[in-house]
Amino acid sequence: MELSRREHLPALQVFFLPESDRELRGREEEPHGPNHTLIFGIERGSRRRRLVRLFQQVMNGMSALPINLPFTLFNKGVRARSEVRDIVMELIREKRQEMEKRKTLDNNHHQYQDLITKFVSMKNEEDSTSSSPMLSDDEIVDNCIVAMVAGHDTSSVLLTFLEQEEIAKGKSGTHDEPLTWDDLSKMKYTWKVATEALRMYPPVFCAFKKVLQDFELGGYIIPKGWQIVWASFMTHMDESIYPDPTTFNPTRFDNKQGATPPFSYIAFGGGPRLCPGYELARIETLTMVHYMVTRFQWKLSLKENLFGRFPMPIFHHGLPIQVKIKKPLHES
Ligand code: HEM
C-alpha cells in the first residue's frame, strides 16, 4: 500500500510540523482543514497554542515532587490538567455539534479524522439497540491526555537524537516518489539507528509497576503489593547484555549470534503493557528521517549542546538547526 503525502503528514503534524507547514504541503485544503491535529482536531491559533503550553505544564508536574502548594511545579501541573479538561470538554461539545450538522457521517471518510471525534462517535456495541456513548466525557478527556502525554515528547526526542547521532553523518537512501510501506520495511539500518538511540537515551527511562506476587531479586524478597520502579536506562547500560554500552553502535542489533535475553530491550516497555504506539512511532521516525535526509540540507547550529532530563531528555539550548529545502514536497 502506498502512503501518499496527505496520508502520512497528519501523523507527523501532531509532533513536528512547523507553523509554515501549509507552504511545504502545497495548497490543497482538506474538507476537515489541514490545520487540525490528529488527536484534538483543533485549528491553529491561540487555543491550540494554549493547549500546547498547558501540556508542557502537565508534563513538568508529572515529574515534580508531589507537593501540592501554590507555585510548585506539581500544583501548576494539576491546575494545567484541569484547564486541559475544560478545553477538551469544549471540543467534545463542538465535535457533537459538527456531527449533528453532518448527518452523512457514516459515508464520510473524514468522520474519524481526529481522536476526539472518533471517541465521541463510538457507541456501546454490547447493546445494539442502544445509542448510548461508549465513553463518558471524562473518559474521553483521560484518553486524550494519555495519548498526548505518551506520544508527544517520546517521538520527538528520539528524532532529535537521531539527528544528533546519525542523520548529520548523511546516512539514508533517496526516494523521489512518495514512501510506501515496502520502503519503510527496507529501512532496516535506519531503524537499528533509532533502536540504538532509544537504548542509550530512552525517553521513558523509568516507570512504576505494582508487584502482583512476591519475588526474589539479587537475594532480596520484593513483597506483593509494593510499588517498584523499572529503569530502562539501567538495563540498557548493563555490560553483560550490551558490551561497551556507552558506545553508539547500531550494528549491535544485527541479530548475529544469540539473541539478547527477554526483557533486555525495554525502550517501549514489555509484557502486556508494551507501548501500543510502537508501530506509529516507527513509521513517524522512518518517514521523518527519510524526508529530513532526502529533501533538506541542514546542519546543527551549535557545536556544544548538552542535555538534561526533565524527565525527558531535553537539550539545554534546544536544538537549533539551519535548514535549506532541497526540493519542495509538492513536487513528489
Ligand atoms: C519513540 C517513541 C515511544 C517510546 C520510546 C515509548 C515508550 C513507551 C513505554 C516504555 C511505555 C510503557 C510504560 C510502562 O510500562 O509503564 C509506553 C506506554 C504507552 N505508550 Fe508509548 N512510546 C513511544 C511512542 C508512543 C506513541 C506514538 C503513542 C501513541 C500515539 C504511545 C502511546 C502509549 C500508551 C497509550 C502507553 C500506555 C500503555 C499501557 O499502559 O497499557 N507511545 N510507551
Image (cartoon, helix red, strand yellow):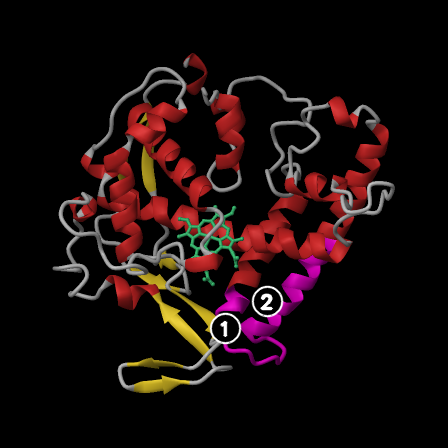
Residue 272 image position (x, y, % from top left): 48, 58
Q: Label 2: which residue? A: 77
**Is residue 152 shown left or right of residue 318?**
right
**Is residue 125 shown left or right of residue 249?**
right
Q: Is residue 70 magenta?
A: yes
Q: Which residue is drawn at 34% across and 15% down?
A: 176
Looking at the rendering, the stretch of residues picked out in magenta corresponds to: 60-87
Position of 59 relative to 289 (above/below): below
Position of 294 relative to 252 (above/below): above
Residue 68 image position (x, y, % from top left): 61, 79
271 or 251, which is in the foreground?
271
CB contact under 8 Å: marks 1 and 2: yes
Residue 132 image position (x, y, % from top left): 84, 47
**Visible residue check, residue 157:** yes
Q: Does the magenta stretch include residue 330?
A: no
Position of 250 relative to 145 (above/below): above
Position of 147 relative to 102 (above/below): below
